[in-house]
Amino acid sequence: MKLSINNLIISLTLGMVSLMPLAHAADTPAKMKPVSSPAMPGVYKIPLVKGVSMDDAVESMKLRANALNIKLVAELPLSNQVEAMIGGKQRRMAIYQFCDALTAKDLVDINVDFAIFLPCRIALIEDKTGQAWLVMMDMDVKELAKTTKMTPELEQKITTVRNGLLEIMHAGANGDL
């Protein structure tokens, strides 16, 4: 199913990760395929493996991002903000923003509208049952390339960033250091 720009913007406003090109399935190693969300196509989520704490997952994501030269540029502890506002404990909800600045610059050079997708986001969400999930949005880079004058080199850079973010998610979900 192809995502329209409106669906992408809606997903972005829901706090999902953005700027993720959706490569064809063959472009993604089998061990890195996340679970597609049936409720929202183009949104991927991965559950944390039993025994991996949310703090361990965050540390693993940070370490893997650093190893891949993808910078963590912001952390948004949304559940802390909600707790402060309502005075009660909340399920954990945090957004981690990652960026490959040179790829982001190349996209914005093509069209400033791509700035709405920056930086890339991975959400750590605890559901009602206590299960922790890593969630991100995924875009179809092939469709994106059709609407812009994107070079094959830039398509490859975006795919590399996207696969790096999937690797970051899997490292977090598995507690890999």
Image: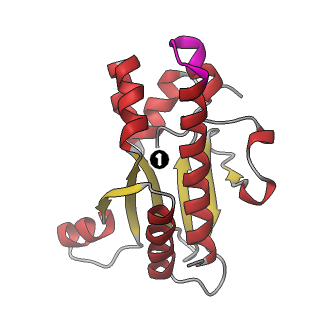
Is 164 or 11 nearer to us in this picture? 164
Identity of the residue drawn at 65% across and 23% down: 142
Image position, residue 177 (x, y; %): 55, 79
Q: Label 1: few (<14), some or many (≥20) within 10 Å?
A: many
The type of residue carrying mark 1 is Val
Residue 8: image location, x then y, percent: 50, 31
Can I make out residue 3 in this image?
Answer: no
Residue 36 location (% of width, % of height): 69, 48
Mark 1 lies on a secondary structure that is loop
Out of 68 and 139, give the one closest to the viewer.
Answer: 68
| Left or right, 156 with reference to 96 | right
Query: x, y (%) of residue 31?
Result: 77, 60
Of 138 and 30, the residue lying toward us: 30
- The verdict on residue 113 being magenta is no
Q: How many marks?
A: 1
* Direction bottom: furthest residue: 51
Q: Residue 14's image quarter?
A: top left
Asked if residue 20 is positioned above or below residue 169 in the image, the reply reads above
- The answer to whether residue 148 is magenta is yes
Foreground pick, 108 / 113: 108
Specify the quadrant of the image occupied by residue 101: top left
Quadrant location, the N terminus? top right
Rendering colour mode: secondary structure
Residue found 58% across the figure and 83% down from its top: 52
Q: Is residue 103 visible?
A: yes
Give the vertical position of 83 relative to 141 (above or below): below
From the image, tell me which residue sits under label 1.
17
The stretch of residues the image draws in magenta is 145-152
**Which residue corresponds to the image point at 53% horizontal and 45% vertical from the top-left?**
161
Q: Quadrant of residue 87?
A: bottom left
Task: Determine whether, in the image, residue 140 is placed left or right of residue 56.
Answer: right
